[in-house]
């Protein structure tokens, strides 16, 4: 086959360093747009992006040519710089070192989009840590609790 074809959806989740509540609501929409621009520049198609004050969820089509680790690094580095420039009190902002990336089937895209959109409602009763643990369990990811959080 002379062409390389792929359609891989990724649900990416990562938190702020120490899960501190850094991201102010008034910057979220612009932050989402900025992250989407980084994804597009890397050959990814953003599908849904949402943040809470202490974490981010991104659903996107993975680039055929860029490795996931590079994409995650670029999104986190670029958005860190952007956030730090928005206000003096954000100068110390950083994302956590790690991340979770989970595959999404074509038939599950709409469900994941709705899940991402409803973060604010969900986190009234569920912490980010419990949410992330549920993803690790659902996807049968082995992990050591000592190294999940930084």
Image (spheres, rainbow, N blue to C red):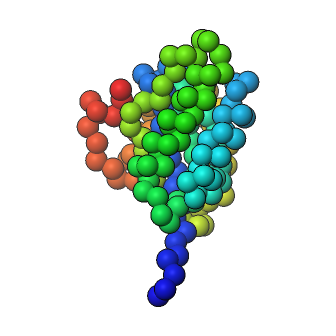
Whether residue 149 sits left or right of residue 8 in the image: it is: left
Report how many numbered discs are placed on residues in the image: 0
**Residue 4 x, y percent position in the rendering:** 49, 77
Q: Dividing the picture into quarters, in which one does residue 100 lie?
A: top left
Residue at 36 percent across and 29 percent down: it is 149
* Figure check: 76 above or below 54: below
Give the quarter of the figure containing the C terminus: top left
* Figure check: 145 above or below 111: above
**Residue 22 x, y percent position in the rendering:** 57, 20
Q: Dividing the picture into quarters, in which one does residue 143 lie?
A: top left
Residue at 52 percent across and 76 percent down: it is 5
Residue at 40 percent across and 53 percent down: it is 139
* Figure check: 58 above or below 31: below
Whether residue 116 sits left or right of residue 73 in the image: it is: right
Would residue 63 be visible to someone looking at this image? Answer: yes
**Residue 73 x, y percent position in the rendering:** 45, 42
- State the residue lying farthest toward the bottom: 1
* Figure check: 16 above or below 143: above
**Residue 97 x, y percent position in the rendering:** 38, 33
Q: Nearer the viewer, residue 66 or 126?
A: 66
Whether residue 96 sits left or right of residue 6 in the image: it is: left
Q: Nearer the viewer, residue 92 or 143?
A: 92
Q: Nearer the viewer, residue 101 or 89?
A: 89
Q: Nearer the viewer, residue 100 or 135?
A: 100
Residue at 58 percent across and 57 percent down: it is 44
Would residue 126 be visible to someone looking at this image? Answer: no
């Amino acid at each position: 086959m002379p062409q390389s074809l792929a359609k891989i959806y990724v649900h990416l989740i990562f938190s702020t360093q120490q899960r501190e509540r850094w991201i102010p609501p008034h910057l979220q929409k612009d932050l989402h747009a900025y992250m989407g621009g980084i994804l597009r520049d890397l050959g990814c198609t953003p599908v849904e992006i949402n943040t809470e004050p202490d974490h981010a969820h991104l659903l996107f089509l993975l680039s055929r040519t860029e490795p996931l680790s590079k994409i995650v690094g670029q999104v986190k580095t670029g958005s860190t710089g952007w956030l730090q420039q928005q206000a003096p009190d954000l100068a110390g902002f950083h994302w956590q070192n790690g991340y979770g990336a989970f595959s999404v089937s074509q038939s599950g895209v709409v469900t994941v989009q709705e899940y991402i959109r409803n973060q604010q409602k969900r986190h009234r009763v569920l912490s980010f840590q419990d949410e992330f643990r549920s993803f690790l369990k659902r996807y049968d990811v082995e992990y050591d609790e000592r190294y999940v959080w930084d």
